[in-house]
Image (cartoon, coloured by chain):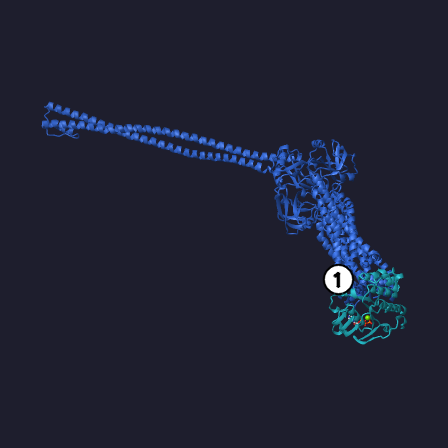
Amino acid sequence: MFVEINKIKKSYGEGESYVQVLKGLSTYVEKGQTCVILGPSGSGKSTFLNAIGGLDDIESGSINIDSLEITKLNSKELSLYRREYLGFIFQFYNLVPNLTVKENIQVCEYLTKEPLDLNELMDILGLTEHQNKFPSQLSGGQQQRCAIARALIKNPKLLLCDEPTGALDYKAAKEILILLEAINKKYGTTMLIVSHNTAIKDMVHRVIKIKDGQISEDYFNTSLIPASQLEW
Amino acid sequence: MILNKRILRELKDNWVRYSALAFLIIISIGLVVSQAGSSDAIFYTLDTNNEKNQLEDGEFSVYVPFTTTQVQELSNKGAKIEDAFYMDLPGIDDSILRVFKNRENINTVQLDGGRLAEKTDEIVLEKHYVENFGVNIGGTITVNQKEYTVTGIGSSPDYINVLQNVSDVLSDFNKFSIAFVTEEEFNQLMQKDTTIEYNYSYKITGDLTDSELKDYLVDMDFDETAVTNKYMREIIDEIEKGKKDLSGGVNKLVDGTQSLADGTRSLADGTGSLANGASELTAGTSELASGTDSLTAGLEELQANNGTINKAADEIFQALLAQANSEFEKMGAGVIVTSDNYSTVINALISSIDPSDSASILTLNTLKGQLDGYKAFKDGLQTYTSGVESAYTGSLELSEGADTVNEGSMELAKGVNILNSGTAKLNSGTTELNSGMGEFQSEVSKFITDNMDYQYVNLITFSEAQDSQRITICRNDAATMKYAALMAGLIIITLLAYMISVFMIHTIDKESTVIGALYAMGYVKKELRNHFMILPMVIVSLASILGTVIGFLLVGGNIEMSSAVYYSYPFYTMVYPPYLLAYGILLPIFIAFIVNYIVIDKKLSMAPLKLLRREKKQHKLANVDLKNMGFINRYRIRQLLREIRGNITMFFGLFIAILLMMLGFCIYGSVDSYVNNTTKDVKYDYLYILKYPPKTAPVDSYKAYSKPLSAYLDLTGGDMDVTLQGIDDANPYFDFSLEGDKKEVRISDSVADKFGYRVGDQIILNDKLEDRSYSFTVKEIVNFASGLYIFMDIKDMRDVFDQEDDYYNTLMSDHELAIEDGRIDTVITVNEMIEASKQMYSVLSGTIFAIVGASIILFVIVMYLLLKMMIDKSTFSISLIKVFGYNEKEVKKLYLGSAFYTVVITAIIAIPVSKMIVNKVYPYLVSYVSAGMGANLSPLLYLFIVGIIFISYLIVNFMAGRHLKKISLVEILKDRE
Ligand SMILES: Nc1ncnc2c1ncn2[C@@H]1O[C@H](COP(=O)(O)OP(=O)(O)OP(=O)(O)O)[C@@H](O)[C@H]1O
Ligand SMILES: [Mg+2]
């Protein structure tokens, strides 16, 4: 298994404000799969994703990525793990405001020895014409595409997306989803996508639903609907 | 690293902020480097000048110039000396020119231009005097009614600070400077002038110490008859006369005792004669006695023979009687005759014989006749012997009488003898007295030579170069300025480095989600830290390099505008000391690196998730309960607390600005109060310090006794000159009482300030020339701003310094006194004093403007940058609040109001605290000024400071207000939180 998650528990706060967010979650994702994580707000989706990304630590359980037990890593090792394996896409694009599109992508190109072809990637993501613009000069969808390019440039083995379309309108959101799909096809990137958009469930290999810190549903799609045909 | 591309854009986007910061760094380092660099250039210039022109090790003045032998003697001792005689002559306007002859080996003149005087009508002038009166080389100047051609302009290493009197607080080129003429001309001037000072400069060549040299000079013989100064001559003559009078008196006394001795000797002689007479008498009576003795002896001999005669006569009679008896027997008369009965018996016999028997009768008669005759002889003999006896007795008596006479005369002689020995004792007494008188006389003359001779110590003044205000103060000033600048620079650089880090934190905060995202992608802290360090380091490096370069470029102007205006030394030589390059360039970089590294590293150590979520550590203070406040105030305070880091930074920045401002104003205030108090405290108009006080002081003047002494000053670790002034209770110019013990003094507040003395303190005043120290007790602190004065009762002072009961050397008056010039050492008129003290304004105005100006710039920039930063941070909420419908004015109130609180709080704390700091620091800055200059700040100046703070705040408020206005409603859409 590429991603193996075993009984992870996570809680916040103490006393009255104590809240158990992840209550012993276990699951796995195989290499090259796309996976959507669905669930109501506050159910712990982001927490789960962040734990896999090594951004948040867990209380118990194990997270094994490509046979690497990341719960045992210190922050420096975690950085290197992220550097080697991960791409991140956030709801808010978090681009470096005073770098151009191209430069923003280059920032992450720097992190690997074997980056993807920058121009090709920009082409795929339709950023070539915007490559010299600053984020503030882009629409939300364009910014998100840039963020995706930034996340993909280092050809991550695992792409973690937290509400990648959350801030976008239908059209822009759809474009992003089409891109993600294309990328998975082209580069075989394993993807974990957190979303409120239930429509996504039909375009991914795997659907995990979280409720109250537990996995309430976990299934594989037998047939996939192309992103372009999704409606919501 | 591609990320670094954002740096330039960050710089471009925030160019106001970064250029303002860079500007602050540049001006602070520029000012500090220019100040320290000026000081170093001055040091170097002075040092090379001192070496090149053979700065003296010290100088001294004497009454009688040395003979060549004496000069040689001193040279052998290890002190090379050169005469630097001078006289103060009237120059341009009312100025005085101190004229020297050209120097040869010590303190040689450094010419800025031209050449030394070569002819008798040529002169070299001091550079500032020349500037002041607009004289040029080749021009002419009238000195002492003689016209000279100016051949050169320069300075002399022993008159860097061109003070007429070493005790002067300030020089004044309108009043005094120095000039040099040829030796020939000088000798001619000397012929005319009586007020020449025989001053010598020395350089120690052997292993002699300065104080050994001084002692040697004190002991050195000299010919006091060669003293030429008229007034000194008077004094010497008087002393000589006194000495003569004294020894004359002693001589008379000696003569008197001599006469006494002579008298007693005559008396002794008289009694001697008397004794002789008595002796003779005794001898006469003695002869008499011995005559009578001889007589007696004769008579005694006679008397002794009496017995023999009488015995013989008796024996003859007895024989006659025996014959008669035998006859009678034969006759059968049967009678026996004795000497007593012979006549009767014979007569009875005769009668018994027949008358006829004539023959028998006849025979009997014959016998009887014979016996009778013999008996008569015998009786005669008896009479004779008893006569002899009586004569003997008589002569015995005579002899006895003569003896008595003799005895009498002997007693008389004895009496005479006692008398005589009495006289002899008297005589020896007077002889002793006489010889004692001789001793006394020699004692007196010894006393005169031993003690009254010290008046004739040839040495008048002695001063080591290191103690001379003329030589050292420029350097000391520069040193003080240098260390003050370096210290202030350090503080400001640290502040600015911290400010930069605050902006970096602001940037990091602003981009915190981006940073979180980068972390999420696998960036490590080191990479981001390195990235965020670049901008501050580049700014600081460039600014400090630029600041240092500008600083060095400003050195010249700085020197030309301050030190060189006031002090007289050759054109400066630029130096680039490595330490200063390190200070100007490396130190800011180092400080900025440390501060930013710590701050940025800490900031970047936050968990990526926290950065992504913009989680900020809410300060505890931000949760403070503000229920009871109005909305606006509550909002402001919340804003203030939310931006507590920015506000604390602002506090420190403004604090330093206010501290600088305070320093600037205190410098002004101290000069101002010095000038004002001088005007107020000095109530006489003329003060004459006399070298040779006349016997009787002019009427309408008040006598005082001034003595230059020195006291140890902690601040400089050296001695500072003070004037001890003995005044009279009747002196109208001082309104304090002089009551107290002999060793109690009143110190001026100026002295109290300078030395930190308090009432009841024991103070030690040193007389360097005499190598003596005096201790006094501070009885009271009195108001007297001018110079450094300590007052005491003139009577006590005369006592302490062994002066006569009417001694004085100072006169105070409300008008000019008619005193011969030659008697005067210094005249100080209050107007001149005030003029001189006012000079301080111009001397220090540059410094004051620089400091106050820098403080305002610092204030405005620091406040503006931080306020702007806080506004930037709150863009979203400001935009939001605008959206809510608050108008510009209200937004301003809410967001700039917190800064107002900070300014008010800072001002309330910083004004008193910085005053306290300046109070502590200021004495060091003026430690070499020989006046007590406190960091005084009048209420008006306080108001000024408050006013400047307020106006600066308004300016910033206005600028920030414009910035606020620019925040559009759409920010809320762009930015999200
Ligand atoms: N740092 C935190 N401190 C305390 N509680 C937290 C923290 N982060 C998350 N939580 C809580 O954990 C729970 C899960 O949060 P999480 O962000 O994982 O939910 P989510 O499923 O992603 O919700 P949404 O769809 O709204 O993003 C929530 O109840 C949230 O309040
Ligand atoms: Mg979430």
Relative to the observer, which residue lies in front, B14 or B797? B14
Image check: B106 left or right of B448? right
Q: Which chain is blue?
A: B
Q: Secondary structure at mark 1?
A: helix
Q: Looking at the picture, how far across and down is residue B942, in whole percent?
A: 77, 54
Q: Looking at the picture, how far across and down is residue B519, in whole percent?
A: 79, 64
Q: Badge 1 local density, few (<14 within 10 Å), some, or many (20+)?
A: few
Q: Which chain is cyan?
A: A
Count the marks: 1
Image check: B822 left or right of A35? left
Q: Quadrant of residue B113?
A: top right
Give the quadrant of ligand 1. Answer: bottom right
> What amino acid type should be assigned to the residue bearing mark 1?
Lys
Q: Quadrant of the N terminus of chain A?
A: bottom right
Q: Looking at the picture, how far across and down is residue A111, in whole percent?
A: 80, 62
Relative to the observer, which residue lies in front, B48 or B452? B48
Q: Is residue A184 shown above or below B394?
A: below
Q: Is residue B3 shown above or below B455?
A: below
Asked if residue B325 can be seen in this view, the reply is yes
Q: Quadrant of residue A145?
A: bottom right
Image check: B372 left or right of A136? left
Q: Quadrant of the C terminus of chain A?
A: bottom right
Relative to the observer, which residue lies in front, B957 or B364? B957
Instruction: Indicate yes or no: mark 1 CB to ligand 1 under 8 Å.
Output: no
Asked if residue B901 can be seen in this view, the reply is no
Q: Is residue B755 shown above or below B379?
A: below
Q: Residue furthest bottom?
A: A216
* Chain assignment, label 1: B
Residue position marked by numbered label 1 in the rendering: B602
Q: Quadrant of residue B957?
A: bottom right
Q: Looking at the picture, how far across and down is residue B762, in whole percent?
A: 63, 50
